[in-house]
Image (spheres, rainbow, N blue to C red):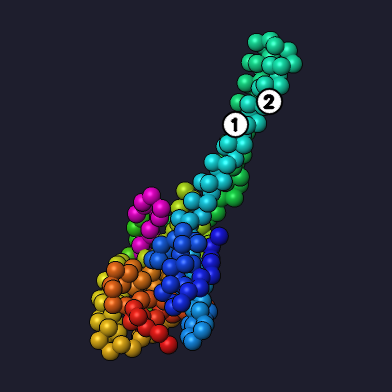
Amino acid sequence: MHSAEGTGKNIEQAIQNALLELKASREDVDIKILNEGGFLKKAKVLVTIAEDAREKYEKKESLKKELVEEKNDEDFAAEFLNKKIEKTKEKKVQIIADEEISDKVKEQEETPKKERVEKQKIAPEKFLEDMLKVLNITDFSIEKEEDEKFIHYNIVSEQAKELIGHHGECLFALSYILGVACEENGKRLVLDIGGYRDKRKESLIELAKRTANKVAKTGRYFKFEPMDASERKIIHTALQDDDRVTTLSKGEEPRRYLIVFPKEYKE
């Protein structure tokens, strides 16, 4: 389940109810206000797992399914073995049953591996090199860093800076295409150009703090311009422990934007 609706006497309570149903953290979701509530009306919101956090929750669901399947396989094996033993009461048959079960388990383990090989996508480095050549960018290098969940690629080139675009619009579009077209070790691929993401993150955190101070001082909400999901998450995370303000995401991609308003704000 990637989304859930929540209701409450105010927006904040509605958000918390939806988060409980999703079993998700606030920094991992996007929030859409369906009804801000009012006199004799409850507030209503739609909380959706953000794209950049969806993999984490899908892995949790996958793990649950694997545990259930494993339990089913164990029940199957036990039933199969008992029938063989009851039928012949001979040790030889028990050995045969064990071998058949072992073959079945091996087949189940090997099948997904074969399917993953067949569905292997384009190599990321090759994709990036070809893309840069098409764009007539010849003097470049590609740096690679890998952690438990992500593989980060950073293009280093004076020419490549032109690919960043206004507030990283081109960069985020290229990063999305890279993730769709390529695959490596089942991890999410993230593209950066000239270390732009780290620089942008620092500026967004400072912007979030200044905005929170302004909102708390004036008592009026502040609406950001549309931005990428990863940038919205940076602001959500930067302000999640600020008791003075609350953050919400509204609108539809790619024009989805973020609002910061006083904690006790009511329309």
The location of residue 255, given as percent across then percent down, is 48, 80
The location of residue 42, given as percent across then percent down, is 51, 79
Label annotation for residue 80: 2
Question: Relative to 89, does residue 180 appear above or below in the rendering?
Answer: below
Q: Can you say which quadrant of the picture contains the C terminus?
A: bottom left
Task: Specify start and end residues of the magenta stretch as a single range.
Answer: 145-155
Q: Residues within 10 Å of mark 2 (few under 14, many from 20)?
A: some
The location of residue 99, given as percent across then percent down, is 63, 21
Q: Check if residue 153 falls in the magenta segment.
A: yes
Give the overall secondary structure of the magenta segment.
strand
Question: Relative to 30, does residue 121 appear above or below in the rendering?
Answer: above
Q: In the rendered structure, which amino acid carries the disc numbered 1? A: Glu
Which of these two is toward me, 76 or 170? 76
For the point 33% across and 65% down, which residue is it?
156
Q: Can you say which quadrant of the picture contains the N terminus?
A: bottom right
Q: In the rendered structure, which amino acid carries the disc numbered 2? A: Phe
The location of residue 7, given as percent across then percent down, is 51, 73
Which of these two is toward me, 91 or 175? 91
Q: Between marks 1 and 2, how big is the CA–CA gap?
A: 10 Å
Secondary structure found at label 2: helix
Secondary structure found at label 1: helix
Which of these two is toward me, 234 or 84? 84
Q: Would you say residue 159 is visible in this rendering?
A: no
Q: Would you say residue 92 is visible in this rendering?
A: yes
Q: Dot 1 corresponds to which residue?
A: 74
